[in-house]
Amino acid sequence: MTEPQATPDFRFAVHGTDGRARTGAITMPRGVVRTPAFMPVGTAATVKAMYADQVRDLGADIVLGNTYHLMLRPGAERMARLGGLHRFMRWDGPILTDSGGFQVMSLSALRKLDEDGVTFRSHIDGTAHRMSPERSIEIQGLLGSDIQMQLDECVRLPAPPEAIEKAMRLSLRWAERCRVAFGEQAGKAMFGIVQGGDIPELRVSSARALVDLDLKGYAIGGLAVGEPQAVMLAMIETVEPHLPAHKPRYLMGVGTPDDLLRSVERGVDMFDCVMPTRAGRHGLAYTRHGRINLRNARHAEDTRPLDEASACPATRDYSRAYLHHLVRSDEILGMMLLTWNNLAYYQDLMAGMRTAIRAGRFLAFAEETRAGWERAEVAAKAGA
């Protein structure tokens, strides 16, 4: 198959399926996003502990920036004067920005929500700010992102049904306003966000209403916020049949490697999560041998690398004993190496899924991957 190329407009094509799992590509002026895709999180114009060149070399086609954090520091208007987010952080590929809604709800002090938007105080210095659907889209435009998200209200689970429905209805009204504010932008896209908590009927209503807006992509939001994995997967299964097959599906804020496998199996195309970078800063490595906690004393004299077969230098060339020493000494290099390893593993996992889907063996790949984790876990418990 010929490799897809950048296109002057935003396009999505499915190139292969295996059950509900699918592989394809999003193409736009700044490049191609191979799906299923994992987007490293660059909250404040940086993927923490990584150079942009490293992130690109690991196979990431797209990164995520955060509207809330960037509007507070350095500021959207300043970012525009400096040439936009791509130039600012030296990333020439596509960037998706979230709307800031989740951070407003979870980080801000003294927030007040109304029909028009949300008033909140910065978690940095306490200054007052106002975010409306229109302002969220304006900020994302000033940042210059390629995929922009609607402003929504995200409710943490569990929550009362009436609170979940109220937030879902408000998010739909805000989606309409965001669509108008976004208009038609050549080569760019705005995605809507399906809400509805853990209530199937609300999820279906939200999905159908968003599809009526004829957006370029659809996200599933409000999951991985405290509910069990089984609930998250059930909501994906509920929503997926109601989303257009010819448009990308993005599961926001997810997740563990197992979450990714099980969600791709259910038809999801895009993911983001702080887990691999955050875990790396706290001494936890994700590998094909499962999770390895480098803080554990049993690694103190282990001369093996994390994975001798990996193409990533952080994974292949440094001993577990050295990584253990760095982590226990709170050395910055330890955070850098483990973040590098984790993002490499996540990108390798996504590449493996894409290959397996094209070969019609996705379920076998998923089973083999989980079996590798389980074997390593058994060996670790046995003291091997």
Image (spheres, helix red, strand yellow):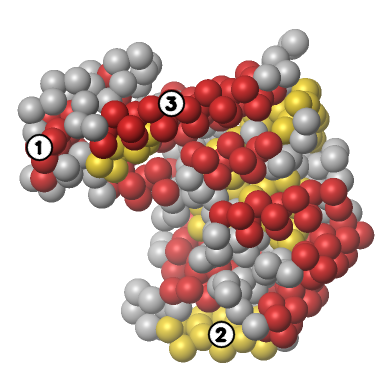
Which of labels 2 and 1 is toward the front? 1
Please state which amino acid type lies under the numbered disc 2: Thr
Tag shown at residue 325: 1
Q: What residue occupies the far front of the structure in this picture?
A: 382
Vertical placement of residue 374 versus 156, above or below: above
Pick whichever of labels 3 and 2 is earlier in the sequence: 2
Vertical placement of residue 99 versus 158, above or below: above
**Residue 173 location (% of width, % of height):** 80, 75
Mark 2 → mark 1, Cα distance in angstroms: 46 Å
Name the residue beneath numbered marker 3. Answer: 372
Pick whichever of labels 3 and 1 is earlier in the sequence: 1
Q: Residues within 10 Å of mark 3 (few under 14, many from 20)?
A: some
What SS does tag 3 mark?
helix
Q: What residue occupies the far right of the structure in this picture?
A: 212
**Residue 204 location (% of width, % of height):** 83, 63
Quadrant occupied by the N terminus: top right
Vertical placement of residue 164 versus 189, above or below: below
Residue located at (34% from left, 29% from top): 376
- Direction from residue 371 to residue 240 in the image, left or right: right
Q: Residues within 10 Å of mark 1 (few under 14, many from 20)?
A: some
Q: Residues within 10 Å of mark 2 (few under 14, many from 20)?
A: some
Residue located at (37% from left, 45% from top): 277
